[in-house]
Image (cartoon, helix red, strand yellow):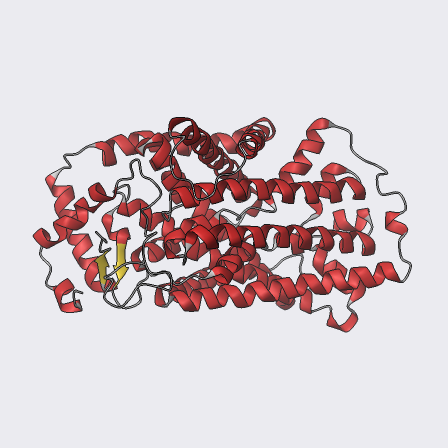
Amino acid sequence: MATAGDVAQSSPEEIQPLRGAAENDAPGPSNGDDGGAGEPQGGSPPDAGVRLKKELGLMDGVGIIVGIIIGSGIFVSPKGVLEYSGSVGVALVVWGVSGLLSMVGALCYAELGTMIPKSGGDYAYIHEAFGPLPAFLYLWVALVIIMPTGNTVIALTFANYILQPLFSNCDSPPDIPIRLIAAVVICFLTWVNCTNVKWATKVQDVFTGSKIFALIIIIGAGVYHLATGNVDNYRKPFEGTNMDVAAFATAFYQGLFSFAGWNYLNFVVEELQDPYRNLPRAIMISLPLVTIIYFLTNLAYFAVLTQSEMLASNAVAVSFGNRMLGVMAWIMPFFVVCSTFGSLNGGIFASSRLFFVGARQGHLPQILALINKDNYTPVPSLLFLGFMTVFMLISSDVAVLINYISFSESAFILTSIAALLWLRYKEPDRHRPIKVWLGFPILFFVICLFLVVLPIIQRPIELGVAILVISVGVPVYYVCIHREKKPPCLENFMDNVTRTTQILCRGLPEEKHE
């Protein structure tokens, strides 16, 4: 293993292999035996070289999925489903069916993740099936919109709830303190993830446990309320049902996006111990758990709060706590803070690996493919993601940010499911440790198509911006990536930047296992 002195003394010629490393790593037809599948399951030995270590066990995987899915939404604004469905009964049906459909999508990703056991998730699958340009477009949109914007939304929610008690006489805290607190928590969690993978996963496990505990309190209080005879809100559960097809479809749209995050474990599959077993197991534990918790939590909300109270509340869990928890009502805002903190940590951990893998493939500057030689973490990738996330704080309009994310993410999940179907047709005999029933990917393809088409009809202007960003990626690819011969001045500049980053971040390129 190279020492820090080796890094400091590297010449441009010694850095040259880093620039060409992507050529050896370009994905091609495989039999599912790459991506670290043959490595020791309990983590790499000390002499395994500089590479990301397999330090994530089954429960770490469960913590990542559950921790990212259960963000602030279930505490703050689960009213979207009720608003468009029109009745308590249909809203509960939508929550249950949304969970089942998300499970179908997660099982499709279990097939993809075990067939192509590489970190990077959708990027790796799209690259494998459709080639470098569509994969780059996903990476481009994830870089500009999906990952930093998603993390920014969570950080802003965290900051809002931290400051709310200090500005209790105002409708909302001032904008500048919210952005400053959001920037601080982004920087802190970026540092945690740079320092130690185990620290990051421990943070994830603890805060995932805290948000589940909070939801259990809500469920318990709701069950107690029903058990004492307060069933008025359920006497006519389907009264007022909205029969408009567009509104009903939007209710499902809201429900499905409340389960967003079920595919994030696929971004770190190379760091998962025994991914062929633990990836599907983590999915099979997480999605039913989240579905049951979401369903019971909404059951409790509807038992205590009327429909009008639900729709009027800006923070449903807080309204519920004020009604049911008395002097302990303060714990609901506290748990919202814990929930957003854990979700942000999981988002930073998983999404940074996408940029690392993209750089390893040659689709991003190779400095992002460096690994810290002491902590075995992708420090440059994490710092870059942290910078982009803080940069997105130029806008604090959460609704607009969410609209950009929703369309872009749906479009590329649709592409990944299309990749699964294409590989079934193109390579029917390929080794698949998990092979789901063909009806599952076809069903989920239709669902994703609906999630892409519906927002175009409802919000054409905002989504036009997202489509424009995707389109800009095409010339960027051909000018900056596809050209084999780069200008010498650009190559020299990138060599200098890479060498400087190696020294500052104590970074080395990933060592390959032959």
Q: Position of residue 336 (x, y in %)?
A: 62, 61
Closest to the observer: 510 or 189? 510
Closest to the observer: 162 or 298? 298
Q: Tell me: 286 left or right of 354.
A: right
Q: Tell me: 63 left or right of 273.
A: right
Asked if 493 appears above or below 437 in the picture, the reply is below
Asked if 15 appears above or below 422 in the picture, the reply is below
Q: Tell me: 277 left or right of 257.
A: left
Q: Give the quarter of the figure containing the N terminus.
A: bottom left
Q: Is residue 453 visible?
A: yes
Which residue does the image show at 46% across and 53% down from the upper left? 277
Closest to the observer: 404 or 290? 290
Q: Is residue 393 visible?
A: no
Q: Position of residue 135 (x, y in %)?
A: 35, 36
Q: Tell me: 234 left or right of 297.
A: right
Q: Position of residue 222 (x, y in %)?
A: 79, 60
Which residue does the image show at 91% across and 59% down from the upper left? 229
Which residue does the image show at 71% across and 58% down from the upper left? 317
Which residue does the image show at 63% across and 67% down from the upper left? 334
